[in-house]
Image (cartoon, coloured by chain):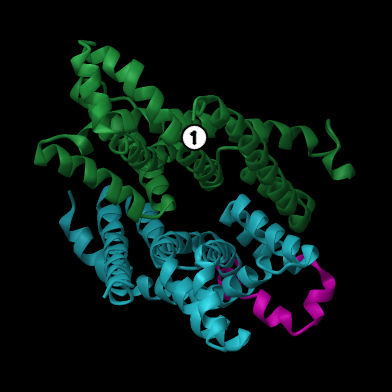
Chain colours: A cyan, B green
């Protein structure tokens, strides 16, 4: 066991964690809106809109995240037309490509989580709102959405942890995130176990924090107060 | 379409074999995972705190650390570990493990952690009376597990195991970093030599969708079979 290596690699890995956290928070932020948008589309009665949202979530949940990143980073640059638009400024950066891929991926999972949460809301609650003379719009924003978010907290917590692990794939498109730096140190020192312990420890610490924050929120917004 | 032709002119046959490789790695990894689950599920359900800790340590660490990191650990550390064990027996030659075994074991360790959780949940949700009734009827321990508990457990576990299978199938795309030629690696090679990444990666996505779709249909049949009588 090479403790010196563990100590010297710790600050480097901690620095790389910042990129991991940036990727995670950006994709979760955009993904939440995307997920909410598609969850609402899934509940639409129009069969085309409904099917469109279904196909989106099916495709992004049925294919590996790695394929999605590669299509966006290596594939989209191939289209000549895109190179001439302003989008190219975004798509040539691996950082933004990774965020786009993660957002689309987490959006698909989030839409499923929120959809099932919307569907488990008891009709009586909506009827109660209606009988009180509250407009449909307010019922949706003030009653359905808050209940759905509370309902989906445990599942969404899992999704955050899965996404945190997913950001490690950013290292495959040249980004030096926590896994990227860990791989670099492993391949230069050939000490995989030491680096794994430090990098894995940082990931586990983040998992631990996320897990506890979600648990706290679940308690705070519990219906049984 | 000519890019997908079979034979020397296209990539059809290469991608076909790559798909078979993905299926082979996934199935092997799933079986390796069951092996791990077989060891760790009893530990998690054990009465002893130390054994509990070992079981929990495995599932927590593996489920909290990115798959890619586990793969790198085995890819770079696997042959070193084997050589160390071999050196204890007086064998000092260089040993190289092939990419298939590294990949299947790495993904197997990951899928094993998920399978362990599934089996634990399934066993815990079987009514206690079932265990007691089996005991009262004088069925031996072996029969208790294989004839009474296992069939009931499988019914509860299959829907969740189907999720584990889907995760495992998608995780195998990550072992392309070790050089094993499965769908992702083959697409990477084809994309590089034809300069058409968009087509090949999209085709890879279609292949994965096809695999997940087919396996979903097959698992649904299995589910029907095991829920007879409910």
Residue at 35% x, 46% y: name it.
B73
The residue singled out by tag 1 in the image is B99
Q: In the rendered view, tell whether residue A224 sits above or below residue A2.
A: below
Residue at 46% x, 33% y: name it.
B29
Residue A112 at x, y = what percent?
Answer: 56, 61
Instruction: Identify the image quadrant of the N terminus of chain B.
Output: top right
Residue at 12% x, 35% y: name it.
B47
Query: Is residue A165 among what the camera can see?
Result: yes
Q: Name the main secondary structure of what is drawn in magenta.
A: helix
Residue B9 appears left or right of B210: right
Residue A59 appears left or right of A78: left
Label 1 SS:
helix
Q: Is-magenta flag for residue B96? A: no
Q: Quadrant of residue B10?
A: top right
| Residue at the extreme right | B2
The answer to which of B43 and A111 lies nearer the viewer is A111
Residue A90 at x, y = what percent?
Answer: 65, 79
Which chain contains the residue that carries disc 1?
B
The answer to which of B227 and B206 lies nearer the viewer is B227
Q: Is-magenta flag for residue A100? A: yes
Q: Quadrant of residue A220?
A: bottom left
Residue at 33% x, 73% y: name it.
A223
Query: Is residue B101 among what the camera can see?
Result: no
Residue B119 at x, y = what percent?
Answer: 35, 35
User: Number of numbered discs present?
Assistant: 1
| Residue at the extreme front | A131
Q: Residues within 10 Å of mark 1 (few under 14, many from 20)?
A: some
The answer to which of A103 and B192 lies nearer the viewer is A103
Residue A48 at x, y = what percent?
Answer: 80, 64
Residue A135 appears left or right of B129: right
What is the span of residues highlighted in magenta in the rendered image? A78-102
């Amino acid at each position: 066991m090479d403790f010196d290596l563990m100590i010297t690699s710790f600050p480097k890995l901690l620095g790389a964690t910042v990129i991991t956290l940036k990727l995670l928070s950006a994709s979760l932020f955009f993904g939440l809106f995307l997920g909410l948008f598609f969850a609402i589309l899934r509940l639409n009665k129009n069969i085309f809109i409904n099917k469109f949202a279904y196909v989106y979530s099916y495709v992004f949940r049925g294919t590996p995240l790695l394929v999605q990143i590669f299509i966006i980073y290596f594939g989209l640059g191939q289209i000549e037309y895109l190179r001439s638009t302003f989008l190219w400024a975004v798509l040539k950066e691996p950082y933004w490509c990774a965020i786009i891929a993660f957002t689309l991926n987490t959006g698909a999972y989030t839409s499923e989580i929120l959809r099932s949460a919307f569907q488990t809301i008891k009709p009586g609650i909506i009827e109660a709102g209606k009988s009180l003379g509250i407009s449909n719009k307010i019922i949706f924003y003030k009653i359905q959405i808050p209940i759905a978010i509370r309902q989906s907290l445990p599942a969404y917590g899992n999704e955050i942890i899965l996404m945190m692990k997913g950001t490690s794939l950013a290292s495959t498109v040249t980004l030096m995130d926590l896994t990227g730096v860990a791989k670099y140190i492993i391949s230069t020192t050939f000490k995989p176990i030491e680096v794994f312990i430090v990098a894995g420890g940082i990931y586990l610490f983040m998992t631990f924090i996320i897990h506890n924050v979600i648990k706290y929120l679940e308690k705070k917004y519990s219906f049984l107060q | 379409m000519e890019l997908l032709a079979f034979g020397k002119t296209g990539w059809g046959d290469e991608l076909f074999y790559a798909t078979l490789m993905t299926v082979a790695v996934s199935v092997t990894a799933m079986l390796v995972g069951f092996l791990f689950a077989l060891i760790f599920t009893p530990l998690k359900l054990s009465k002893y705190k130390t054994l509990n800790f070992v079981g929990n340590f495995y599932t927590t660490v593996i489920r909290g650390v990115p798959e890619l990191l586990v793969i790198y650990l085995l890819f770079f550390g696997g042959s070193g570990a084997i050589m160390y064990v071999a050196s204890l027996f007086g064998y000092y030659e260089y040993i190289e493990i092939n990419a298939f075994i590294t990949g299947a074991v790495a993904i197997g360790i990951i899928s094993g952690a998920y399978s362990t959780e599934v089996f634990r949940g399934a066993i815990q949700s079987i009514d206690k009376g079932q265990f007691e009734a089996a005991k009262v009827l004088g069925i031996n321990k072996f029969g208790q597990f294989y004839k009474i508990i296992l069939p009931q457990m499988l019914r509860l576990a299959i829907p969740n195991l189907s999720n584990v299978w889907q995760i495992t199938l998608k995780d195998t795309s990550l072992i392309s970093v070790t050089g094993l030629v499965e769908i992702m690696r083959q697409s990477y090679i084809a994309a590089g030599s034809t300069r058409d990444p968009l087509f090949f990666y999209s085709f890879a996505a279609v292949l994965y969708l096809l695999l997940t779709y087919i396996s979903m249909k097959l698992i649904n049949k299995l589910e029907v079979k095991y829920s007879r009588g409910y």
